[in-house]
Amino acid sequence: MKKLENTGILVVRILMPILFIVAGWGKITGYSATQQYMEHMGVPGFLLPLTILLELGGGLAILFGLLTRFTAIVTAVFALITAFIFHIDFSVAGNAINFMKNLTIAGGYLLLFITGPGAYSIDRILNKK
């Protein structure tokens, strides 16, 4: 049963950060447009590098199981904050589903925070030493 659990957590760590890795890369390639959108929504543009770090760097950290619990809780909070900043106006098409998507993402990352990275992770290798 433990092997199934560890394999399941690995699959979760592969699937969950895909959205963040792709979004972080997209923010790099569309930096100025993203910065303008953030500022239009009332978020200072100077926060964009931190957003990229969290999405791309944090996504890769989760994927490889590095600093998993810390990254998972930070990402859960990020998903909730962005839901309430960018997706709260339900009169805008797609915002209701994106709001619920962010809540679901936050829930998944909270669960990953609770369970930890599983056996197949850099965190496990580092903690064995």
Image (cartoon, rainbow, N blue to C red):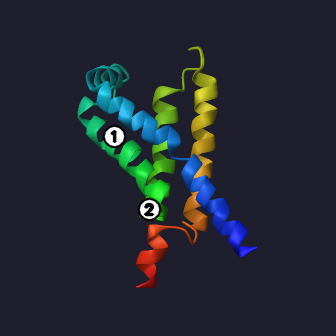
Estimate how packed mark 2 is, as few (under 14), some (14 to 19) or many (20 or more) residues with alpha carbons within 10 Å.
some
Q: Residue at x 30, y 32 (%)?
A: 28
What label does residue 52 carry, if any? 1
Mark 2 vs mark 1, foreground winner is 1
Q: Residues within 10 Å of mark 1 (few under 14, many from 20)?
A: many
Label 2 sits on residue? 70
Answer left or right for 123 relative to 111.
left
Q: Residue at x 42, y 56 (%)?
A: 61
| Location of residue 90 with respect to 48 vertically, above or below | above
Query: Going 59% across and 60% down the picture, which residue do you hit?
Result: 10
> Residue placed at 56% from the left, 14% from the top?
92
Give how far across and how far down residue 70 sits, in percent. 44, 62
Determine the CA span between mark 2 and mark 1: 17 Å
Element assignment for label 2: helix
Residue occupying the far right of the picture? 1
Circle number at residue 121: none
Residue type at mark 2 is Phe
Kindly check if marks 2 and 1 are in contact, taking CB atoms under 8 A apart as contact. Answer: no
- Give the image quarter of residue 89: top right
User: Where in the figure is residue 104, as x and y percent of width and height?
Assistant: 63, 42
Earlier residue among tags 2 and 1 = 1
Residue 23 or residue 115, whichever sits in front: 23
Pinpoint residue 74: horizontal percent, then vertical percent: 44, 53
Q: Return the residue nearer the eye: 122 or 73.
A: 122
Can see residue 80?
A: no
Residue 10 can be seen in this image = yes
The quarter in which the C terminus is drawn is bottom left
Observer-nearest of 69 and 90: 69
